Structure formats: structure tokens, C-alpha cells
Image (cartoon, rainbow, N blue to C red):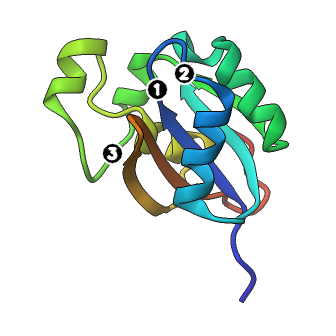
Amino acid sequence: MPRPELAVGVGLRPGTSADDIVAAVREVVGGARIVRLATMERRASEPGFISAAEQLSAEIAAFSAEELEGATVPNPSGRVAAAIGTSSVAEAAAILASGGGELVVLKSIVSGIVVAAAAILMGEEF
């Protein structure tokens, strides 16, 4: 069975470098084909995030805290919710950017960057 195309959700701090984001994503998903790199709106304009998406040949997907909070995730965080208004960034962004696909990688933290991945549903646009 072919490996699914992925939507990868990323939670990151301001100023995170593209190299760090790409390294974290590749550590978590290996050589899988990444179609979309997703995060919350206020991080999607970060230069490191934009450059990471370019390096991964991935579309950028950005979601508001309200949209992210509407996604059902297996690992919500009260601490994150108190800080930014949503209990999940990486897992929720991956699910939303995949068109509602199943998480194939639960959130993992690599060097302070949170990464999760969901399989893109065939023919789905986010």
C-alpha cells in the first residue's frame, strides 16, 4: 500500500528557524511526502515557517485559534489553551489541513517544535 500524502501540523515559537523546523518535521515523518505545512495564523507569517514550507515543497495552511479549537484531538493541552486560546496547534492543524484525515503521527516534540501529521483524504481541499 502506498504511503499517504501528509498534512503536517507544527507548533512553534516566534523566531524559529527554517532549518530547525525542517529538521524536526523530517525527524518525525521521515521521507514521507508532505503536501501541506500547517500552523496557527499568527505563526504562518514567520519567515522560518514560510521558508520551511518552501524547502519541503509544501503548501502553507493557516488556521485561527477558534478553528483549531474546533478540531477533536487526542492530546489537548490546558497549558496551551491558557496561553494561546486553543488546546492544540500541531494535531489540530494537521487534521484541518488534511481535510479531516486521520492522525498518522501524534504530536511529538523535537527541540521545542511540536509536530503532528495526518493523512490527506483523497481529493480533499482544506
Quarter that holds the N terminus = bottom right
- Residue at 37 percent across and 32 percent down: it is 70
What is the spatial separation of the Cα atoms under label 2 and label 3, in whole angstroms? 27 Å
Q: Is residue 99 visible?
A: no
Q: Amino acid at mark 3?
A: Thr
Where in the figure is residue 109, as x and y percent of width and height? 37, 46
Residue bearing the label numbered 1: 12
Q: Earlier in the sequence, mark 3 or mark 1?
A: 1
Residue nearer the viewer, 105 or 16: 16
Q: Are marks 2 and 1 in contact (CB under 8 Å)?
A: yes
Answer with left or right where residue 77 lies relative to residue 42.
left
Packing grade of label 2 (10 A; few <14, some 14-19, many >=20) is: some
Residue 82 sits in quarter: top left
What is the spatial separation of the Cα atoms under label 2 and label 1, in whole angstroms? 7 Å
| Element carrying mark 3 | loop
Q: Are marks 2 and 3 in contact (CB under 8 Å)?
A: no
Packing grade of label 1 (10 A; few <14, some 14-19, many >=20) is: many
Mark 3 vs mark 1, foreground winner is: 1
Residue bearing the label numbered 2: 16
Q: Are marks 3 and 1 in contact (CB under 8 Å)?
A: no
Packing grade of label 3 (10 A; few <14, some 14-19, many >=20) is: some
